[in-house]
Image (tube, rainbow, N blue to C red):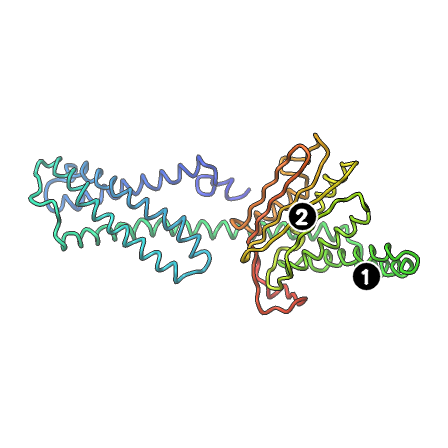
Amino acid sequence: MSAMDQYPFIFSRERKWRLRRHLTFWAVWWLSLSFLYSFIAARTAGDYLSHLPVSMMESLVYLIVHIMLSYLLIYFVVPRFIMRQKYGQAAIMVVCCFLLAAGTSALVKFTVINTVSDFYMMEPRKSFWPSWASFHMAMMAGLRGGITVAGFAVAIKLMKTLYEKQERNLQLQKENTESQLQLLKAQVHPHFLFNTLNNIFSLTQDKSPAAAKMVTGLSAMLRFMLYESNKPVVPLFREFHLIREYIDLEKVRYGNRLDLHVELPDQDNELYIAPLLLLPLIENSFKHGTSDIIDQPWITLSARIEDNVLFLKLLNGKSAGSTIPGENGGIGLQNVRKRLQLLYPGRHELQMQQEEEVFIINMKVELVRIKQIQPGSIAAENQPHV
C-alpha cells in the first residue's frame, strides 16, 4: 500500500483532502498567532482574556497577507525557480515577495487594524498617517510573521515534493525490474535471432530485394528494443529513426492503399527522450485505426520542437462507430500515459480525442538536453534520469 493510500490527509491530491489540509494549516496558524498576540498585549496592560478577541481579529486580517505570501512562494517560486535549480532568480523572487508582504502588512496595520481597534477601544487616533518609525516597525513585525509562516509552508511543500519524487523513483525502479523479468522470460537469445535474420537476408537479397529491405528494417528495430530500450534516455533522432523503420514496414503491408503524411523535425543530437515512448502511439494508429478501414486508410503524423519541448500530433482514420478500447485507449496507450506520469511528472500533456471517423492524439513533452555527447555514443551510466 502506497503512502497516498495510507495517509490521504497528507499525500492525496483529491480536492477534498487538499482543502482539509489547507484549512487545518491556516486554522492552526490563526489560533497560534491569536494566542501569541494576546499574550504579548497582556504583558503590557490588562489581562489575557480581554485582549484575546482583538488579537483574533488582528490575526484574521494578517492571515490574508500570510496566505498570499505562502501561496506565491509554494506555487510560483518553488516550482518555477527552486525545483528547476534557478537559485539566483529564486533568491531575488523570495526577497521581493517578503518585502511585498512586509509592506502590505504595514498598510493593513495602519488602515484596517487601527481603524477596528479605535472602534473597539473607543479611543480615536490623533493622526491617521503614521510616522516613518512606526511604519518601519510595522514592516519589521509583518516581515517576521511572514518569514515564519512562509518558512513552514515552503518546508512542508519541499519535504512533500521530495518524498513523492522518491516514491515515484522507487515505483519506476520496481516496474522496470518487473518489465525486465517479463522480457527475460520471453526473450530469444539475441545472437540466434540476429544470425537467423542475417541468413534470411542473404537468401532474399537476390530473389526479393523488397523482402531483404524489410528484414533489414525489422533487424534494426529488434536491435534497438533489445539493446537500447533498457537505457534511461536515448537521442530523440534515434526514436524518430525507429518510427520511420516501423512505418516503412507497414507501408509494404498496405501498399498504395495507405494515405500517409509524416513530418518529423530535423536531427537534434542533444535532445534525449525515454526509449520506446513514441512508438506505441504510431503502432496504435495502425492497429486500431487503419486496420479497421476497408476503403482508404490514412494517417497523419507531425512533430515539432520548440526549445526543449516536443509537440506531437497524430491523427488516423477509423471506421464510423468504432472506438478505441478502454477509457484512455488500448493497453499500449495506457502504458504510454503511465510512463509519462512516472518519467515526466508535471512536464507533459497527453490528450486523446475520438470523433466519428478520426482518432486524435496530442502530446507535449519537455525533453532533457545533454550536451557534449557524440552522436551514437550513449553511455547510460553517465546519463541523468528523466
Q: Is residue 328 left or right of residue 199?
A: left
Res. 346 mark: none
Position of the N terminus by quadrant = top right
For label 1, the SS is: helix
The residue at the point 17 percent across, 45 percent down is 110
Identify the residue position indicated by label 1 in the image. Answer: 191
Q: Nearer the viewer, residue 364 or 254?
A: 254
* Front position among marks 2 and 1: 2
For label 2, the SS is: strand
- In terms of image quadrants, where is residue 218? bottom right
The residue at the point 69 percent across, 59 percent down is 228
Identify the residue position indicated by label 2 in the image. Answer: 301
Mark 1, other Cα within 10 Å: few <14 / some 14–19 / many ≥20: few
Give residue 100's position: percent from left, percent from top: 28, 52
Give residue 120's position: percent from left, percent from top: 13, 35
Q: Is residue 281 left or right of residue 343?
A: right
